[in-house]
Amino acid sequence: MKRYILHVEYDGTRYAGYQLQPDVITIQGELETALEAIYHAPVRIHASGRTDTGVHAHYQIIHFDPPCELKNLNLKAALNTLLTGDIRVINTAIQDETFHARYSARERRYRYIVSTRETALDRFRVWRFFHSLDFLAMQECASILLGEHDFTSFCSAQAEVNHKRCTILRSAWEQDETRLIYYINGNRFLHSMVRSLVGTMVEVGKGRITPDEFASMLELRDRSAGAVTAPPQGLSLIYVRYEHPIPWTKEIL
Amino acid sequence: MKRYILHVEYDGTRYAGYQLQPDVITIQGELETALEAIYHAPVRIHASGRTDTGVHAHYQIIHFDPPCELKNLNLKAALNTLLTGDIRVINTAIQDETFHARYSARERRYRYIVSTRETALDRFRVWRFFHSLDFLAMQECASILLGEHDFTSFCSAQAEVNHKRCTILRSAWEQDETRLIYYINGNRFLHSMVRSLVGTMVEVGKGRITPDEFASMLELRDRSAGAVTAPPQGLSLIYVRYEHPIPWTKEIL
């Protein structure tokens, strides 16, 4: 049986995160419900990673094994008809069973936007933060994160994993007239990690923590070291890199 | 008495346009209600121009004459506290009575975004249009509009004005991977004019009208010449230029 791959974009505003949970609306739940309506059988999906409550994804990769072959199925059109407008299937592909949305991923890329002025149009896409911030101090913290580190100090207690080492390939702040934008690329990310890093770097920007103290917090490997978590709406998963590029098709699956 | 100036940004999605009307929610209505709550007296506001139902503004300029002087008033903070999140006051200024938001404006700039793929995150900011479009033919139409023309063929019957001549200073399509973006700058715009131009240029992009036919439609000066109106959510007022730059203040008004 073929394995189906989906590029999904979603607006996380009204979802309790990616992962299926009872009694709340989740991205996984909505997609599995739509797939069950198409296949008339339960379908389990697998994502490149989970996103927290309120976090967006420009580029989430999902795979599933269809319970049967449906002739003349336009999978993308069928899903987009069944889903509400805040979850969209952008592209589809077919891979063999050696491809796994999570385990085959080599790199995840996240972006966090802080708006330094009021905004109506981007209010669900940014953290509006009007204090003036020390950009160079925040940039210094960002560069400390490059390479392999144990991120115990910057993840939530819910991060149940074997180890908390992550390799960070890019970590940098950029700025334009009205925004500070943080880009971080890494092989893996822990629960709440990007938001903990951003929230704590913003504390550095405010002058409440020095870049040296930020570096010491990382070294401490202690969840109670004082990390501050930024709100979710500024965060978006923007790319997932696999060893081989995904062969997106414009044909009907 | 001083004249107060506001730079206002709004998400037009849930509003019946800028202009005050009975029984519907409008941008003007929301702002005048908030000002009345501040001054305990009716306040009439004047904008650089009206935006239609569902159209956004990154940069709308508004003036009003306060009915009284309030000591220690932080006008921006007071308005932003009273308004909902989809209307935000970005900046304030003081001018003398020779400044008029509408009559002193020299140039308005609009942007229209067509998304050529599905999108969840920008669904209220773009026209999602998935046909393939002839970009060069659309660009040819855009350049026909430069200079002074009578736009009777490209405005709605509701445009009650002395004359329908507008001088267009910029008219160009740009494109990136997933979007076609139209920029138009002019001294004035008529009711529904940008949406009529965009909708009809998209017909050209689809091959249903040639650029020559588009030019003939403009020459006809006839509302029934066949213009097609694009939906509002792709359109945004992005700048208004005045003879003298507005002296935005960071101080409390």
Image (cartoon, coloured by chain):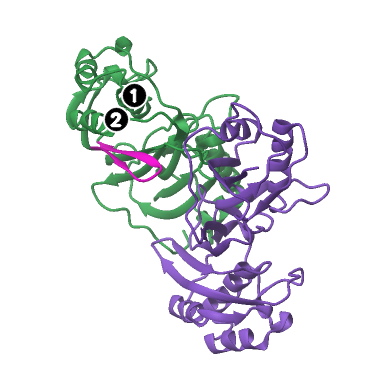
Chain colours: A purple, B green
- For the N terminus of chain A, the image quarter is top right
Q: Is residue A24 visible?
A: yes
Residue A134 is labelled as none
Chain letter of the residue carrying label 2: B
Secondary structure under badge 1? helix
Chain letter of the residue carrying label 1: B
Q: Is residue A7 visible?
A: no
Where residue A89 sits, quadrant-wise, is top right
- With B113 as the anchor, is A62 left or right in this view? right
Q: Point out residue B210 in the picture as x, y percentages from the top left corner.
A: 24, 20
Q: Point out residue B54 in the picture as x, y percentages from the top left corner.
A: 50, 32
* Depth order, front residue of A216/B53: A216
The residue where tag 1 is placed is: B206
Crowd around label 1: few <14 · some 14–19 · many ≥20 (10 Å): some
Residue at 60% across / 29% down in the picture?
A73
* Depth order, front residue of A176/A101: A101
Residue A76 lies in magenta, yes or no?
A: no
Residue B134 is labelled as 2
Residue at the front extreme, as displayed: A1
| Residue range (magenta) | B171-186
Where residue B189 sits, quadrant-wise, is top left
Residue at 62% across / 56% down in the picture?
A100
Magenta: main secondary structure: strand
Residue at the top extreme, as displayed: B224
Mark 2: amino acid = Asp
Does A250 sit above or below residue A120? above
- For the C terminus of chain A, the image quarter is top right
**What is the distance, in whole Å, between disc 1 and disc 2 at their CAs?**
7 Å
Secondary structure under badge 2? loop
Residue at 53% across / 26% down in the picture?
B21
Which of marks 2 and 1 precedes in the sequence?
2
